Amino acid sequence: MKSAGLSNAKVIDVHAHIVIGETIGAAGDFGPFMGHNADGSPYFQVGKNYRLNGVRYLGSPFMDVDVRLRRMAERGIDFQVVSPNPLTYLHFIPADEAARFCRVHNDAVAAIVSAHPDKLAGLAALPMQSPQAAITELRRTVTELGLAGAAFGTDARLPLDDAALDPLYEEAVRLDVPLFIHPGPAGIDGPAGDPALKRFELDIIAGFAAQETLAVATLIYGGVIDRHPGLDICLSHGGGGTALLVGRMAKGARKRPWSPASLRPEGAFEERLKRLWFDTHVDHPLILPLLTAVVGREHLLYGTNFAGWDEPDAGQGDTRASIPGDLADNARRLLRAPRSA
């Protein structure tokens, strides 16, 4: 049952990550682990090779629900959809360890949102390296725990258009829940990625946008949108560079030899693009009008990367008065929630 809070909310944030204390060590040798460096600064570590230094999770909105709710009130956010921390997608570790981690994570998320149903909903973490395990966990979290859908990374062992993932997409349609796709930094538990992205934090500044753009292209070029017309997928950060590259992406669909016949007619790529959903966390005022023109306003959702380094500054652009109400209505449609009369 959808909460009255979701039905009444004027501002709904769909891009808000959560860090779960119960998951510390839940993935065995892959952690995650938390601690303090010799200088007293905090760290968050996944596996042996990835350590995030200087970000405090304990006592922050990421881990403390009361702090989260106070910050939401300060920022004028009525309702929030929490999703897994991208550092802990863990799509490349052994499937049994990933499945165990996801169960621990999702049970804890369900407990949090069930305690605050008028303010929070949750998206499940999925072990994407095993499509069958992902299906099982999606079904369990939706039917038994009441979560609103699932979230996973752009990069995993299987590309997003792999036929092995079709049963997972079919299950999401059957359960009538959306999927949220968001990048994670390369090299945490999988391939290292482009070394150029390791400088200046380009993996999150530019790499995330590249991953999101690739995800959009893969979902359309790879036929996922055609094979699953009832599937609702939301891409973070406005789909990365999609709004800037749509002309080139559409031209590729019309002219390149690998493109299927279904994508060759004029407007075919653009029509499929408008079936996807995108959050509005795009960081520049000129980009949002372009994104709106390209994908259509009815599939845009308000998102903040809540409490993250690039969260909108309070009182600068994203204020309660400046967030159009139709974005909340769009979120209700995506989340299958009625609007209060």
Image (cartoon, rainbow, N blue to C red):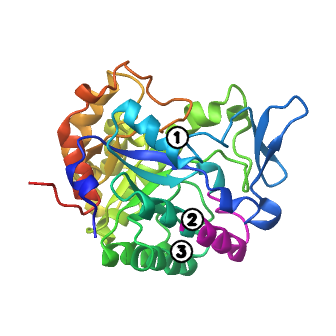
Q: Which residues are magenta?
A: 89-106
The amino acid type, in three-letter code, at marker 3 is Ala
Establish if 307 lies above or below 31: above
Which residue is identified by label 1? Answer: 67
Residue 333 in view (yes/no): yes
**Residue, x 52% and y 35% (percent of image)?**
307
**Label 2, label 1: how far apart the Cα atoms are:** 17 Å
Which residue is identified by label 3? Answer: 134
Residues at discs 3 and 1 in contact (Cβ within 8 Å): no
Dot in front, 2 or 3? 2
**Residue, x 27% and y 53% (percent of image)?**
5
Query: Which element carries disc 3, helix, strand or loop?
Result: helix
Which residue is identified by label 2? Answer: 108
Q: Which mark is residue 168?
A: none
- Residue 249, percent from left and from top: 37, 43
Please report whichever mark, 2 or 1, sits nearer to the chain's N-terminal start.
1
Q: Quadrant of residue 204?
A: top right
Establish if 226 lies above or below 155: below
Queried whether the magenta region covers residue 236, the answer comes back as no
Q: Nearer the viewer, residue 57 or 161?
A: 57
- Residue 247, percent from left and from top: 31, 37
The amino acid type, in three-letter code, at marker 2 is Ala
Looking at the rendered image, the quarter that the C terminus falls into is: bottom left
Establish if 163 lies above or below 88: below
**Label 3, label 1: how far apart the Cα atoms are:** 31 Å
Dot in front, 3 or 1? 1
The amino acid type, in three-letter code, at marker 1 is Val
Magenta segment's dominant SS is helix
